[in-house]
Image: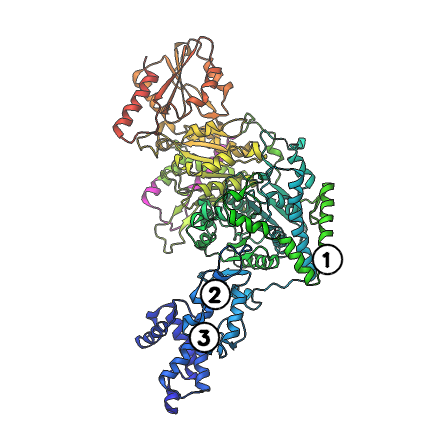
Amino acid sequence: MKEMQDNSALYDGNAPFIEELYELYLGNPAQVSEEWRAYFDHLQKMPGAVAMDVPHSAVVQSFAERARHPCVPVQGADVDALVNKQIAVLQLINAYRFRGMMRANVDPLKRRELPDVPELQPEFYGLNDADLSHVFKTGSFLAPESSTLHDILRILRETYCGNIGSEYMYLSDTTQKRWVQDRIEPNRAQPQFSPESKRRILEQLTAAETLEKYLHTRYVGQKRFSLEGSDSLIPLLNHLIQRAGSQGVQEMVIGMAHRGRLNVLVNTIGKLPGDLFLEFEGKHAASSKLPSGDVKYHQGFSTDVATPGGPMHLTLAFNPSHLEIVNPVVEGSVRARQQRRHDVVGDQVVPVLIHGDAAFAGQGVVMETLNLSKTRGFGTGGTVHIVINNQIGFTTSDPRDTRSTLYCTDVAKMVAAPIFHVNGDDPEAVLLVTEIALDFRMNFHKDVVIDLVCYRRLGHNEQDEPMVTQPLMYKAIAQHPTTRKLYADRLIAESVLLPHDPEEMIAAYRRDLDAGVSVNRSVLTNFKQSFATDWAPFKKGKWTDPANTSVPKADLRRLSGVLTTTPPNFKLHPRVEKIIADRRLMGEGKLPLDWGMAENLAYATLLENGFAVRLSGQDSGRGTFFHRHAVLHDQNREKWDDGAYLPLQNIAENQPRFLAIDSVLSEEAVLGFEYGYASAEPNELVIWEAQFGDFANGAQVVIDQFISAGEAKWGRLCGLVMLLPHGFEGQGPEHSSARPERYLQLCAEDNIQVCMPTTAAQIFHLLRRQMVRPYRKPLIVMTPKSLLRHKDAMSSLEDLAKGKFHPVIGEVDVADPDQVTRVVACSGKVYYDLLAARRERKFNHIAIVRVEQLYPFPVEQFTTEMQRYKKAKELVWAQEEPMNQGAWYQIQHHLRDCLSAKQQLFYAGRPASASPAVGYAAKHQEQQQALVDAAINK
């Protein structure tokens, strides 16, 4: 028997060999021999086994230990029993790592019994009471190397089933899993704070609670979307800011909905209570008056605070009531700030997003934003997500109605973000989780989630009665002490505080509120951050301000050469090679310039002028219609991630950034991101291109709430450009109209610009005007499809070198204005259909005028054009879109304002329609011919 033991494969000398084999097996069973695979398969099928990755090192160690110190006769069955017991213990440890959070004490209200989780019971693995006193190896568990099963269970429950529930075992990166374990297992997920830190926590809880009670009694019945029940958010944020500062973070941008926003504004960001009180009283400082303004719980704010690592700039983003839509806006703003600081990995600027539980699970933009997190064009080095999980959404609290997942945070698992559920009534546990979450983000530059499990003490707003729909929940809340009260009693019991200290904290805070002074002592006054952006030059501009957008012909030729030069041995696709060859001739003046060449030259000249360019969309590098080719691809590439060349990144040494990125298949999040980026960076041309113009309707919230109204509500300037392919060419309802009527309906107070250019020179000058002119308003461009290569839409180098953008383009053929009895006005592609028909019919009594800028409507230029035709009695507005769509209903009043008393206004176009366009080719042609005839015929 001794000889058999010494020669056994389980002999301790073979331990490294077994470990290597088992590691190979765990990675890929086919990598080990059939005999060993059968043996390891047998272990996985033992009674009580679960399909989990069991760390094998402790198993090997146990084998060796048994071989060195046999305590029973080494019969085959006995060896298997000993081995299986050890394996069972390791599987139990692993089960707690995977599922321990299901038994964690994270609900302050304890509304439901904790679920029965059989995998967390020793019996599930064949262990019994007799094994509780036996000593087992703990494997990779960061606890004593060996311990009794009784103690192992106690430590596991303290670590994974206390006031913190950790979810991280789904992470595919072993290093990250080990990192989390190293942060929670040695200390058993139990926080350790100094008495001074504990006192500071209570002061912040006192601030959170006292502000809400103060507002509740001073402004009875006014909406404020109280933080009460989730008060631990304030110490969480303050601790996060201070710890981030100590790690070198220079800026933090926070996005949140309205729940608790006023509390964060005053107690974290540093807004003066006196200013908040003025808003409750309907008063606003003269300097802050805006055309529209917004309610107090949508307001943003920025300030600078002192941290152990130096000053940090804090920004709370403005946000409408559309829950979660601020997420991509914050990410875009952060990316712009990181670019400004050359913060490539995201160590200096950190995004923080605060969510509601129902919204985090329910709003699709959450998933879309998460999906941006690790992409090249949209990553920000990881986001700290905080879910204010008050276990109710409006009036819905039954999880059978609020989501289809176990937790509201499960969507974050799609990007392998670790999730830490924490009891909001244990502020020390909240701060421990905050430290772990921030450190994880800073170490691995990935998203991380804090699920702050709490409750909502009042209704959805202060006028709501929650007992109507949640009687059981709100009976429990009515009897539940506040977080401040629970923690104050705890600190008194620990002798950290004297019995009268908590009340003195309340009194001191109320005195500051009464005085209206700042309650955040870390706020810095008169501090000027070095990377601040100066928006002052853009605040007084008008759209009529002149802008010299011309570029010397010599520069255009030189830049054309750069745009048409590729690296040695770079093989272009034959079709692209022909396009580049033609562009070379365009740059030499031998061919007229098409749209794609003019657009690329606009970017090249702006880069030379010192403006960075950022272009994103679902096919922006090539262009949906094969026209742009800002990104060239080597047909002989040997690696999937190599072989792309961007001529616009090689204009000159030390040039500004040029980025053309094919975005994820999202409109809402990507457009929100680009709005946030452009709102933070006025000196970069930021463009979002829809694959087809009507695809932008998936981002309508961004358009309605931010792009069109952000300046009127919040005073936020933004120079974002939207390129929306538009034109009726018979492609059906979803690929024809960019819905210009929707943008025109939103136009007022010179808030946005809506243009429909029809020549290559026009897009060149329009894009350059957007940056050269000190005027930052969103620019909506209805870009063409068929006109991209239309010979009549091409331009000469001379047009770029000496021209400018024309809001109105007059008649190009008719020599004698006195012959004109009818003026046809139009925008976009239909102009060329009308022109061809008039030329064919040789009608010299009709002049065709193009309105290239629909808003702000160029009244002066259009009036001047109309005055040329003194004998014209008719003005016909012709459009491809149905009568109830397009520009007709939105610009009639402008057109009439430009007419004389003897002139009349008529319409030529498709009849009103529920659909943007027909799907039948024959019907399309019939309608197109009819509208042309109506506009041109005598």
Decide if residue 871 is on the left or right side of residue 178. left
The disc at residue 97 is: 2
Q: Magenta stretch: residue 558 in it? A: yes
- Asked which secondary structure carries label 2, the reply is helix
Is 376 left, or right, of 570 in this rendering? right
Q: Residues within 10 Å of mark 3 (few under 14, many from 20)?
A: some
Foreground of the two, 431 or 131: 131
Residue that numbered label 3 is attached to: 57
CB of mark 2 within 8 Å of CB of mark 3? no
For mark 1, what is the residue? 499
Foreground label between 2 and 1:
1
- What amino acid type should be assigned to the residue bearing mark 1? Pro
Evaluate if marks 2 and 1 touch, with contact meaning CB atoms under 8 Å apart.
no
The type of residue carrying mark 2 is Arg
Q: Which residues are magenta?
A: 549-578
- Residue 442 left/right relative to 64: right
| Figure check: 178 above or below 639 | below
Q: State how far apart marks 2 and 3 are (Cα).
A: 17 Å
Report the Cα–Cα distance between label 2 and label 1.
40 Å
Mark 3 or mark 1, which is nearer to you?
A: 1
Within-10-Å neighbours for mark 2: few <14, some 14–19, many 20+: many
Residue 146 colored magenta? no
Q: Quadrant of the C terminus?
A: top left
Quadrant where the N terminus lies? bottom left
Residue displayed at 74% across by 55% down:
500
Query: CA–CA distance between discs 3 and 1?
Result: 52 Å
